[in-house]
Image (spheres, rainbow, N blue to C red):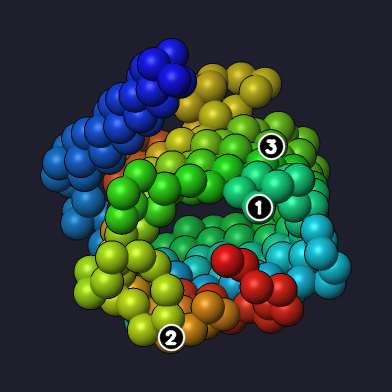
Amino acid sequence: MILRYLQHTHLDIMLKSAFLLSLFTLVSFAANCQTVFQEGQGMWLMFFNRTEIAEKWSIHTEIQDRSYNISHKEEQLLLRGGVNYHLKKNLWVTAGYGYIESYPPDDAVGNTVLEHRIWQQGLYFHSIGRFFIEHRGRVEQRFVGTEYRDRIRYRLMVNAPLNKERMGPKTLFISVYNEAFFHIEDSPYDRNRFYTAIGYQFNRSLNVQTGWLGQNFNGKTKGYLQVALFANLLWSDPS
């Protein structure tokens, strides 16, 4: 019994320490984004869906309409889908395909660039107190125009309810994440994204979020206003 207690206590300390270190990393990144408004503000409108098709299977679909600025000058259209297999309640693996159109800005000469993307990922969920934490690791095989590139990315996301002790229906919450992207073939660093938002969980299938994302890319950091709708079709009881 004593050994079990010590093991549990040690694990609890490790989880809390890891969470605090990750939170410090997110705050540090946000504090250093001093040049973010120099590049203008863009906008991302997003829709996400997960539909359960069996006890351990679900389908992921999403649409993202990304703009260079608030006036909605098109920057990128992203369509992504995948199939999730639920190894456990809190551990999923996914494989999917993405179609991306990237458009040149008004002041640049260029054509629309098409990308076909194959991707695989792992999702792991857990909680520390009232904080719901998601770890996402993703590998991408990208066919961009006539070029091929591999990329890996890792995202740490934390959701925390504001008006309740736990996430659930009729919950106002905050969401924060940081995601780092790395190339495999050449110079490792690709980009970094920091996101913070406020959301409302209407029921276990529907929530909306609005927030701000800072993306560091090519030595510059640009901000994007984000509005996202998550609408899922869930047949099983998640409790």
Residue sitting nearer the eye, 71 or 7: 7
**Of 159 and 64, which appears nearest the observer?**
159
Element type where label 1 sits in the image: loop
Q: Can residue 213 be seen in this view?
A: no
- The amino acid type of the residue labelled 1 equals Lys
Name the mark on residue 202: 2
Q: Which mark is residue 139?
A: 3
| Callout in the foreground (1, 2) | 1
Horizontal and vertical percent position of residue 159 = 36, 58
Determine whether label 3 and label 1 are within 8 Å by CB: no
Identified at 65% across, 23% down, the residue is: 184
Residue 67, x across and y down, in percent: 45, 71
Amino acid type, callout 2: Phe
Q: Is mark 3 on a helix, strand or loop?
A: strand
The quadrant the N terminus occupies is: top left
Q: Residues within 10 Å of mark 2 (few under 14, many from 20)?
A: some
Numbered mark located on residue 89 in the image = 1
